[in-house]
């Protein structure tokens, strides 16, 4: 059974639909690659997927270990290669816990380990630098 569908909308835009939920994502090519940059680019989605996967796996760990994770935020920066072929060179993610004083050293290490072992992190090509920092 298919889980998602995709459609080319023209003008370097696509629509992707998650079948079970009916939720749709629109992508647009970035301005520096002939697009309008009005939506996530496919490589933006990879970067967002890495961050959101890390948060999800940290959430699973937090639930199991009774760690407070609510309100954690992240900023994401995607760096593309300068030389062809065009591809992601680095993904920088900076996590901030709103109440780091609620975490002890062991809990912080558990969360960091969970983030670095999320499925997306493990699937990315080793040439893509994953620069992750934790403000907790």
Image (cartoon, rainbow, N blue to C red):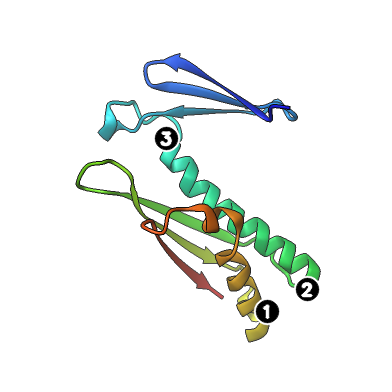
Residue 44 quadrant:
top left
User: Are circles 3 and 2 on residues that touch, CB within 8 Å?
Assistant: no
Check disc 3: other Cα within 10 Å, few if <14, some if 14-19, many if 20+.
Answer: many
Q: Are marks 2 and 1 in contact (CB under 8 Å)?
A: yes
Instruction: Report how far apart the C-alphas of labels 3 and 2 lie in the structure.
Output: 36 Å
Q: Which residue is nearer to you in this view: 83 or 11? A: 83
Residue 71 percent location from the top left of the image: 65, 60
Among the two numbered marks 3 and 1 on one chain, the one whose residue lies closer to the N terminus:
3
* Few, some or many residues within 10 Å of mark 2 (<14, 14–19, 20+): few
Q: Is residue 90 left or right of residue 74?
A: left
Q: What SS does tag 3 mark?
A: loop
Secondary structure of residue under mark 2? helix
Q: Helix, strand, or loop for circle 1?
A: helix
Question: How many other residues sit within 10 Å of disc 1, few (<14), some (14-19) or many (≥20)?
Answer: some
Is residue 104 at least partly visible in the picture?
no
- Tag 2 residue: 65
Pick whichever, 126 or 34, lies toward us: 126
Whichever of callouts 2 and 1 sits on the residue coming sooner in the sequence is: 2
Residue 120: give x, y in percent of width and height.
56, 53
Q: Is residue 9 left or right of residue 111?
A: left
Image mark count: 3
Residue in view at x 39 percent, y 53 percent: 77
Q: Position of residue 14 (x, y in %)?
A: 48, 22
Residue tagged 3:
41
Question: Relative to residue 73, is residue 33 depicted above or below?
Answer: above
Question: What is the distance, in whole Å, between disc 3 and disc 1 at their CAs?
Answer: 35 Å
Q: Quadrant of the C terminus?
A: bottom right
Position above or below: 42 against 94: above
The tag on residue 107 is 1
The percent position of residue 28, horizontal first and vertical second, equals 41, 28
The answer to which image quadrant residue 76 occupies is bottom left
């Amino acid at each position: 059974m298919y889980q998602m569908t995709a459609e080319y909308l023209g003008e370097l835009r696509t629509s992707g639909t998650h079948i079970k939920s009916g939720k749709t994502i629109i992508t647009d090519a970035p301005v520096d690659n002939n697009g309008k940059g009005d939506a996530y680019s496919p490589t933006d989605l990879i970067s967002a997927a890495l961050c959101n996967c890390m948060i999800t796996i940290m959430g699973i760990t937090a639930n199991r270990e009774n760690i407070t994770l609510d309100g954690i935020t992240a900023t994401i920066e995607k760096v593309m290669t300068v030389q062809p072929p065009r591809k992601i060179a680095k993904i920088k993610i900076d996590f901030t816990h709103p109440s780091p004083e609620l975490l002890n050293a062991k809990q912080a290490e558990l969360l960091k380990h969970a983030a670095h072992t999320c499925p997306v992190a493990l699937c990315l090509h080793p040439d893509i630098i994953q620069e992750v920092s934790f403000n907790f």
